[in-house]
Image (cartoon, rainbow, N blue to C red):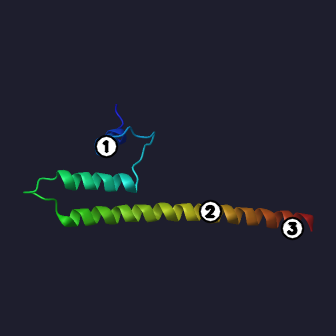
Amino acid sequence: MTDPIAGVRSAVTGTVPANRTTLGQSDFLALMTAQLKNQDPTKPVDNSEYVTQLAQLSTVTGISETNVDLTSIATKLDTLIAAGMAKGATA
């Protein structure tokens, strides 16, 4: 089975893809640009489809950034709790 992401990356950019298993925001924009360049001018894609895709990408990006922030907060809280427990044990 071939890697679909590798095929997409090489088709859009003409380069050999990195060892990745997911597409990012830049990949999405490259695909969208390629789709716009290669669409049939007599049957253009509805603008609302593009807006929907961009909104979904923005939502996923926001969720990913939130997850990173929450992981950072959890790590800091764990450190503070551990420091508080160590301080209480020595008192």
Q: CA distance from mark 1 to mark 2?
A: 33 Å
Q: Circle 1 sits in a helix, a strand or a loop, which is it?
A: helix
Q: Which residue ends up furthest to the top in the rendered image?
A: 1
Tell me the amino acid under the disc marked 2. Ser
- For disc 1, the marked residue is 8
- For disc 3, the marked residue is 88
The image shows residue 25 at horizontal and vertical percentages of 39, 56
Q: Which residue ends up furthest to the right in the rendered image?
A: 91
Q: Quadrant of residue 53?
A: bottom left
Label 1–label 2 contact, CB within 8 A: no
Q: Circle 3 sits in a helix, a strand or a loop, which is it?
A: helix
The image shows residue 69 at horizontal and vertical percentages of 57, 65
Whether residue 21 sits left or right of residue 34 in the image: it is right
Instruction: Name the residue rendered at 25%, 62% in the picture.
Output: 50
Instruction: Name the residue rendered at 11%, 53% in the picture.
Output: 40
- For disc 2, the marked residue is 72
